[in-house]
Amino acid sequence: MTLLIHLLLAPFVLAGLALSFFLALEIAAALGARAQEEKGGGEDLPAGAAAPAFVVVIPAHNEAGTIAPVLENVRAGLRPEDRMLVVADNCADQTADIARAAGAEVLERNDLSRRGKGYALQFALDHLRRSPPPMVVFTDADCFFAPGALQRVAAAAQAADRPAQALYLMKAPAGAGPRLKASEFAWAFMNNARMRGLQKLFDVTRFTGAGFAAPWRALAELDLASGEIVEDLALTMTLIRNGAPPMLVSDALVTSEFPAQEAALTRQAARWSIGSLRFSARAGLAAFVEGVAKGRPAQIGAALDLMIPPLTVFVAALLALGAAGFVAGVAAGAWSLFGLSLIALVIAAAAIVAGWRRFGREALPSESLGGLFALAASKASVFGARGRKSAKSWTPTRGDAQGDSGGENG
């Protein structure tokens, strides 16, 4: 009986312990990188580094009500040699006309049988292939670059001759409740803390959906045309395998806001939470084994990072392992499993607290920590029938809007 319990439970406990330890490594590295930056020892662009001429690609689906200020923001970061290209993707509104009036080049794609951001991005790349630009920057139709961020991320990609990802943060709308503040923390924990640590440890980051610059040579042979609901994760692994791992440019900031409507927030969170879990299940371990076999540190690190579930899901899984370990201890004396699961939970909790103190306290102040329970409770709808249905294929998030690639990250 004891042997059977060990055989059944030990792999899960050891996996939880390993992922908790890796999470702690990421946060420790992020803290070190942040301290180095504050001392003036962070990585700067080479003297005189500048972006080549680039095209900003913006996929947009029925964004007539919101796209104008986004285009104004992008245009403010362009030089005369830079271009702005909007893909009006299966639009039934005035998105294309508004984009043209704002000075953008516009492509209109109408194919209701192939819906999703990946198809829109590939449509843009196929168009650009006729006269390829030196650099392409992808962003979303609801995202805003901080002053100088657009040129900086493109210049970083040029200087390193590899794809570069700006620091992409989601913000809670003004007057938002504790749940959205917790979501803002979870997003910062992922993109500002964990990605900063992953960059420090393995010189790689995830493509996080917006503010992504890449030399044309890294994009020329890609096939992005799919309905993958977590296309950012898939593209990250593809680029790593192609020898072009993305790097983080933490001083180039891109921001967006969470949707205020409950239904839109659930769709967004379901796409991220369920989509990332599915992608991790089918690709995470295989990518790790391949990275080890082929000696690719960036792929090893990215695969381990991919296997860590969204924050609240990970904590819930560790708690469940602890409960199972306790039952195994009582029923069969397998207390070692309970001890290991408890160690995993403590390590993960310590990493989360450290990440919150350094990267998330502004988003989630102490008096709003109760929002974490609201965020956890919201997962009932995310993993319920409606959420699972929206995660079966690409679905719009903001009513009928396409503009994001992520979710609550929690």
Image: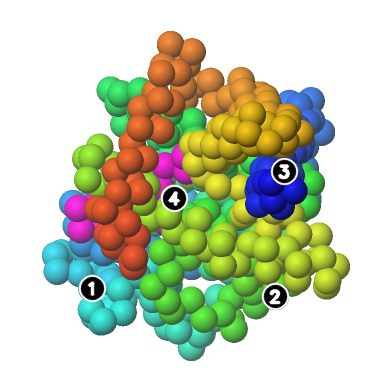
Among the two numbered marks 4 and 2 on one chain, the one whose residue lies closer to the N terminus:
2
Q: CA distance from mark 1 to mark 3?
A: 58 Å
Q: Earlier in the sequence, mark 1 or mark 3?
A: 3
Determine the CA span between mark 2 and mark 1. 31 Å
Regarding mark 1 in the picture, which secondary structure is present there? Answer: loop
Residue 401 highlighted magenta (yes or no):
yes
Depth check, front residue: 404 or 79:
404
Left or right: where does residue 268 sit relative to residue 322? left
Mark 1 vs mark 3: give the one in front: 3
Quarter of the image holding residue 233?
bottom right
Q: Nearer the viewer, residue 115 or 379?
A: 379
Q: Earlier in the sequence, mark 4 or mark 3?
A: 3
Mark 4 nearby-residue class (10 Å; few <14, some 14–19, many ≥20): many
* Badge 2 element: loop
Q: Which residues are magenta?
A: 397-410
The reply to whether the C-beta atoms of the residues labelled 2 and 3 are less than 8 Å apart is no
Please, what secondary structure does the residue beneath circle 4 have? Answer: helix
**Vertical position of residue 29 compared to residue 159: above or below:** above
Type of amino acid at the residue the image marks with label 2: Asn
Instruction: Please tell me which of labels 2 and 1 falls first in the chain.
Output: 1
- Picture coordinates of residue 356, whole percent (x, y): 58, 25
Q: Earlier in the sequence, mark 1 or mark 4?
A: 1
Q: What residue does disc 4 label?
A: 273
Q: Residue furthest front?
A: 1
Mark 1 lies on residue:
90
Q: Which residue is mark 3?
A: 2
Measured from the top left, where is residue 353 in percent x and y?
Answer: 62, 23
Q: Residue at x 41, y 33 (%)?
A: 376
